[in-house]
Image: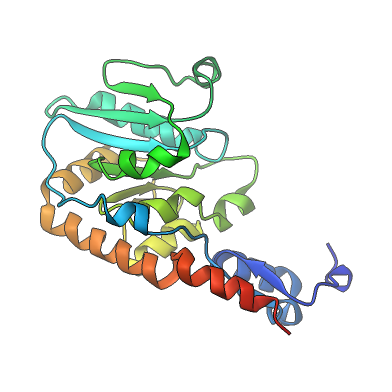
Amino acid sequence: MNKKNIKAEKIIVTNNGTLNYYAKEYGEEISKKITIIYNSTFPEPYLKLHTDYNPKPPYNILYTGRIYWPQIRSLKNLIKAIEEIKDIDINLKIYCPNPKDYLEKLGIVETEKIKIFSAPPQKMPQIQTQADILFLPLSWHTKSQKIIDTATPGKLTDYLITNRPILIHAPSSTFLAQYAKENNFALVVDEEDIEKLKNAIKTLLFNLEFAKQIIENAKATFFKNHDANFNALTFQNFFKK
């Protein structure tokens, strides 16, 4: 795309990573047109479900959402890590709208430790706030590194307000990993290293001081950038002359 062909007077993006990408690709003239409005949700359904974080076995790691090329490799890394953990009672619960036969073709099947469910979106606050760890993956060696590097998955917004710790497994080049580190709202494993994933899981389960700190940072990040009560007004004002 040639910047001369971009006729829009205003441009909305959902994060700084995308803004920086467009600025680099198309120059300062385009970047001046950009406004960031972060992915957002309403916190009220989550706030009423908050409970103190105090994990007990059997421990549950949770992934919610569709599974396809942007996250499949990282999700498989987590599955391998969980299968290799023998000293604690832990499992992965996947809530996914994709059919099980599709997941089987990807190599994701139910085992003693891996369980696959489906649930309507309105049930997600209850499901997510009952997890011990929320897993957020982006993969290495995908068909489009630019998409991976600038993505902020929609489920991040939900995860931030759950009062549960987030485990991110994504390349260091991604805005997601950088955003989490800058705001310290998740434990980030930015290498394809199964041992580091296993250690991260145990840190979140057994270092409660650390886990509760990133939970508080996640909620602070949510209310700073992702609250739909505020972002809806920002979106409305965007169209005012």
Q: Is residue 162 left or right of residue 9?
A: left
In the picture shown, does residue 32 fall above or below 218? below
Q: Nearer the viewer, residue 51 or 149?
A: 51
Residue drawn at x 55%, y 66% as measured from the top left: 15
Residue 151: % across, % down: 55, 54
In this rendering, position of residue 52 left or right of residue 236? left
Quadrant location of residue 119?
A: top left
Can residue 187 be spotted in the picture? no
Q: Is residue 152 rendered to the left or right of residue 184?
A: right
- Image coordinates of residue 88 in percent, x first then y, are 13, 29
Identified at 32% across, 69% down, the residue is: 220
Task: Tell me what residue is drawn at x 42 percent, y 57 percent.
Answer: 177
Which residue is depicted at the point 24% across and 45% down?
200
Please identify the quarter of the rendering in which residue 209 is found. Answer: bottom left
Residue 34 pos. (x, y %): 67, 75
**Position of residue 172 measured from the top left corner of the image (x, y, whole percent):** 44, 55
Q: Is 113 drawn above or below residue 76 in the view shown?
A: above
Q: For the C terminus, which image quadrant?
A: bottom right
